[in-house]
Amino acid sequence: MATPIIMPKFGQMTEESAIVEWLKKEGDKVNKGDILFTVETDKSVMEVESFEAGTLLKITVPPRVNVPVQSTVGFLGNPGEAIPAVAAPAPAAPKKAEPSPAPAATTVTAPKSIAPTAAPIISQTPDARPQTPSLFRISPRAAALAKHSVIDSARIKGTGPEGRIVEKDVRNYLQQHGYDKLRISPAAKELAAKEKLDVLAIQATDDSGRISVADVQRAIAEKPKPLSKMRQVIAQRLTQSFRDTPHFYVTVAVDMTELIAYRSQLKAAGAPYTVTDFIAEAVVLTLQEFPDVNSSTDGKTTRWNSHVNLGIAVSLEQGLVVPVIRAAEQLPLLELSQRTKSLAEKARAGKATPDELSGGTFTISNMGMMDVESFGAIINPGESAILAVASTKPQPVVRDGKIVVRQIMKLTLSCDHRIVDGALGAKFINGIKQKLEDIELWKRLAA
Amino acid sequence: METFDIAVIGAGPGGYPAAIRAAQLGAKVAIIEKEKLGGTCLNWGCIPTKALIAAAEIFEKIKHAEKLGITVKDASVNYSVMIGNKDKAVGTLRSGINSLLTANGVKQFTGTASFVDRNTIEISGGPIINQIFGASVPASRLTAKKIIIATGSTSAMPGFLPKHERVVESRAFLEIQKLPASMIVMGGGFIGCELACMAAMLGVKVTIVELLEDILLLLDPDVRREVRAHMEKNLGIRVLTGKALEKISADGKGVKGNFGDETLSADLLLCAVGRKPVTDGLKLENAGLKTTDRGFIEADDYCRTKVANIFAIGDVTGKIQLAHYATAQGIAAAENAVQTKLHKHDTIVPNVIFTSPEVGTAGLSEDDAKKQNRAVKTGKFRFNGLGKSIATGETTGFVKWIADATTDQLLGAAAVGPHATELIAEAAATIRSELTTRELGRTIHAHPTFSESWMEAAHALHNECIHAPPKRK
């Protein structure tokens, strides 16, 4: 009997997922370990490989349909084998579907490139297209005329019974909107029809006023496209945080001259520390002195975290993820450095698991390599502060009454004013500053 | 020192239309030419070759006229008369340009232009003046608000070639008074192939040596296969590809060169390996301009260079080296130099090759489409299925449409066969107008004409051809 292929569960919290793309077609031979399809989760796009060899007999769930995890998405077996009559899982079903019997085991690995192709997203977006009114709202003749004219009939006001659009309405609409003066190349009209665009909404750029294929392509490019799941998550979480959390900001300038010199010394001796590692360690140490900053609030209660779960923001081509180093206070500097590096690499390669991307208690956002003076970050939901690290630049400063050039880095702490007041924020960020400027401390920690 | 609105350097097919267009728009225009009005195209390129090819084709037709019921005895070639006829045609056209420039009030200067600064040009001697008056003629200067560089290109002659009268490039080849009995053509591009066909039709034993894997590589494989087969089978041209011509030597008796293990010998070697831009003596640095690594002057789609008041057009810009492309750029440059609203020049450029059979292409080739990962459909119709072709006995070749698979838009066309260079005009206009295959297929084409082939090929694209059996799926 054919073996069902099931939608794997990616993280503890994942309840439903959508296939981005089937990499095998029905009838394709599948080897053990071949990638069957890719799946979009909240944080990334994962590849799902086959645990068994056989032929892909049937695809029951097309791309871009949300289905509960553990549901059957297709069948594997020998050519000609009977496929059990299973109804496709209801898209985005509110309830969890029954786990399929004897599922074909699948393993999940992250893909080489996690950028989903844009095309399938666009082609499945009903929102970006003119709404086609139901048969009741428009007469068949009117609908045919609107289609033939490549216009959006949803914009037409109907004068028939109960507001039904009749042919006369379409003709009037065309006349009112200067359709007889519209000039469009035949290929441009064909393309607009294929893309279900309204030719009356397309602007010609050529001197002649004739809409060309390039104009239609411009209109296609301007159609609203859905955000990737990752961006939607970013949008939802950061909007929530910025709306619900009263932010305020404290900035200090840190003199990094000595630490940078010491780091070069360490590097020459083969120790792999980065400036981020020192900042992370200084943050971990300071958080233990100010546990209020390592807590969170819902406005009524406050919750202290016994561990420092340090998030370090990593920018990706298609968004941003925050891998979390759990119980960072238990790690010596060297291990903290190694964990930071390996987690960041994993996140960049799209291989970080959802569990490695959640549960933070404090976050560092480092834009030091982006040549910025200073910036303020938005606090991640569930945390009470975030540290924004700007670029280190040589700057004139006053030392012992003289102007000297020092390597200066600006740190900005964004605080949730509900639990962190100005004084606490100032003390906390100065705690970080003092540590970074205390070269003897690093000599002890890094030795 | 005289002051102009526009100065054009070079009076070739890019420069003189630019000058005329600028004058039409009311500008005071100067044009500077160091040799002859019309440039390479008119004097040593397009026009003279076409005069010779036309004569060669008549001779070729006479040779095969017997089967049409015409007997011509003792037909022979008097090449020096052909050359005289060619020179006459060139002379007529050149004086035509002179009168057009004069009628439009364009002031002509003869000599070599060089920049003094971004608005000032010094004009000195130049080959013709020097020949007549010696190098003693003092240089003159003019200033212009805007300057259009249209200095063109010249045949590239690789340094390893011996300097000998038996080793020539296309310009010198067109001046020889007596055809050789045999010749080697180095380079299988369109210049090499056109001259090879012309010479072969006039009875010269021709061998083409091309370093790359095929001749006319810019064409789709099916198109160039058609040309090559005809050149080899019907014109008796030997085509050698994939290796370089090496150990080239020339002496009083002839030229020799090695192609792999074989030693080739002939009376003449024609080098046609490409053309290089002409910027010698321009002193671009005085205007703040630099050439690219390959010696070209960079210009954008509005023909603007990096210096605000200087434009560049034609072969010297290193884009498409065709006279009509230079003309389109020249007109755009003139309009952009005189008017405030900027125009881009058009980008659908028909390409014509006067080999036997002729070739015309426009828009995207099938190869280009593949490189761009575009889904395309093609429709082809062979001339041997066309009434007019069979009636006139010109049945070699085909026309082909390349269309977008989803919108049916005509993206490109290729014609190889009788009158292909004329036929391509319809295709260029059609592609520029963004017509679809269906519309072209519904357009009534006169019967019996060669142009019907376009309509048939459009039908063929949808497997709805009337005059060809349906393709099996």
Image (cartoon, coloured by chain):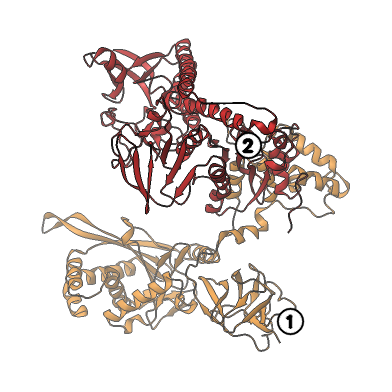
Chain colours: A orange, B red
- Examine the image and state in which quarter residue A205 appears: top right
Q: Does residue B34 sit above or below A73 in this rendering? A: above
Q: In the rendered structure, which amino acid carries the disc numbered 2?
A: Ala
Q: In the rendered structure, which amino acid carries the disc numbered 1?
A: Ile
- Examine the image and state in which quarter residue A151 appears: top right
Label 1 Cα crowd, 10 Å radius (few <14 / some 14-19 / many 20+): some
The residues tagged by marks 2 and 1 sit, at their Cα atoms, a distance apart of 53 Å
Which residue lies at the image location 47% right of the left edge and 37% below the top edge? B196
Which residue lies at the image location 62% right of the left edge and 77% below the top edge? A29
The residue under label 2 is B427
A157 and B54: which is toward the camera: B54
User: Which mark lies nearer to you, 2 or 1?
Assistant: 2
Residue B246 position within the rendered picture, expressed as x and y whole percent measured from the top left: 33, 48
Residue B124 position within the rendered picture, expressed as x and y whole percent measured from the top left: 27, 18
Q: Is residue B34 visible?
A: yes
B385 and B78: which is toward the camera: B78
Q: Considering the image in quadrants, where does the N terminus of chain B appear?
A: top left
Q: Give the secondary structure at mark 1.
A: loop
Is label 2 in contact with label 1 (beta carbons under 8 Å)? Answer: no
The label number, if any, that marks residue B324 in the structure image: none
Q: Is residue A311 visible?
A: no
The residue under label 1 is A83
Describe residue A388's horizontal placement relative to residue A176 as left or right: left
Q: Are marks 2 and 1 on the same chain?
A: no
Residue A18 position within the rendered picture, expressed as x and y whole percent measured from the top left: 61, 71
Chain letter of the residue beneath label 2 in the structure image: B
